[in-house]
Amino acid sequence: MFHSRLRAAALLAGMLGAMVLAQAPARAAPAPNPEADRLAFQAYFRKNYPAVKNSDWGNGPYALNAGMRKQWEAIMQFPPYEFALAAGEKEFNRKFANGRSYADCFPNKGIGIRQNYPYFDTKTGEVVTLGIAINRCRVANGEKPLGYKKGLLAAIETYMAHTSRGKPFDIKVPNDPRALAAYEAGKKFFYSRRGQLNFSCASCHVQKAGHRLRGDILAPALGIMAAFPIYRSKWGEMGTIQWRFVGCNKQVRSVPFKPQSKIYRDLEYFLSYMSNGVPITGPGARP
Amino acid sequence: MSSTIRVRAVASGGTTVVQALINHPMDSGFVKNSKGKLIPPHYIEVLTFEHAGKKVFTAFWGPAVSKDPYIKFTFKGGAKGDDLKISWVDNLGKHDSLTAKLVG
């Protein structure tokens, strides 16, 4: 009798195993559906923070915390990014040695286009961020490429974002398997736990958006891209989202990737797509 | 556009609230650059605000003041349209000034 019970248990386990196996292929390959993801993503935030207007999501933590908002409004009487904005405008309008300028590299002369970046380049099969586009423009015109975290590149982005304020994010994922793969890679990165602290991006910026992390208020992932580049008081200067990615990864004690590495570009692509419809508020100011 | 000074002065009810932001590195002389060399001291020493030709505020700054410093103060008097002259001199003898109008 004891043996027959064992045999029955083994049989049952075998059946369960077979069932799991039968279901596995369907789970392994869900067809990527960026638009469905975006609607679910935005519905989550709108359901949990019903008081926040669409135009306010680009103001990050200030949309969720009245005290921080007051401090920010005081700071914004003298926006700390003003000097970078002036420097960026000057550089943007400067003529290269060959007589061309940044305006010649971008659609609409580079004015009011920040909401379309990053985009997927179907010719080269990769995600092109605004930073990459600026440096390609420089190299094509015989100038040296700039660093991707701060300085002049951040200043140029500051100016380009400023001319695009109020325009809603309009990121497109073309129906190209490479574009969908880039989107999926960014999404996977966003939801994957990493580092010694075992946090994913979503742990803080989705699950705990608006909550405190020590003295700070965590920014919601929805609209987080709209404010970049930002003057971050901790940095004491303007910086790009790529710099912030490096910082975030270090804070969860994982080894960061290089700014504008493929995975960070895919992540920026995914995050920007999730914010489609949220107006650009950049350049921003953050603690 | 290229001024290093940003100012906003609001006159109301016999007093004027002045806020200003100055673009300056304010290097203390104690910080090293990425190559390990000391960055030479470079900071604002005197900052003055003049209302209608009369000094209303003088600040003696030094290496302990932050980069791109911000200042806010109030003085008695001032009316909409008055001139407010802001000027600074740093330890290298560089200087800048700006004249702004008070707003109501």
Image (cartoon, rainbow, N blue to C red):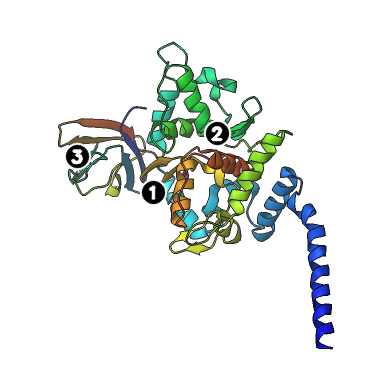
Residue A246 versus residue A39: which sits nearer the camera?
A246
Q: Report which residue position mark 1 lands on.
A: A233
**Residue A53, position as x, y percentages in the image:** 64, 50
Q: Report which residue position mark 2 lands on.
A: A129
The image quarter in which residue A201 lies: bottom right
**Residue B45, position as x, y percentages in the image:** 17, 41
Residue at horizontal 57 percent and vertical 29 percent from the top: A112
Q: Which residue is at the far top?
A: A98
Q: Which residue is at the far bottom?
A: A1
Which residue type carries mark 3?
A: Lys
On the same chain, marks 1 and 2? The answer is yes
Residue at horizontal 73 percent and vertical 44 percent from the top: A32
Which residue type carries mark 2?
A: Thr
The image quarter in which residue A14 lies: bottom right
Residue at horizontal 28 percent and vertical 43 percent from the top: B67
**Residue B100, position as x, y percentages in the image:** 32, 33
On the same chain, marks 3 and 1? The answer is no
Residue A213 horizontal side relative to residue A235, left or right: right
The image quarter in which residue B80 lies: top left
Q: CA distance from mark 3 to mark 1?
A: 25 Å
* Of labels 3 and 1, the one closer to you: 3
Residue A95 horizontal side relative to residue A14, left or right: left
| The N terminus of chain A lies in quadrant | bottom right
N-terminal of the pair, mark 1 or mark 2, is: 2
The 10 Å Cα crowd at callout 2, few under 14, some 14 to 19, many 20 or more, is many
Numbered tag placed on residue B45 in the rendering: none
Q: Report which residue position mark 3 lands on.
A: B37
Circle 3 SS class: loop
In the rendered structure, the residue with mark 2 lies on which chain? A
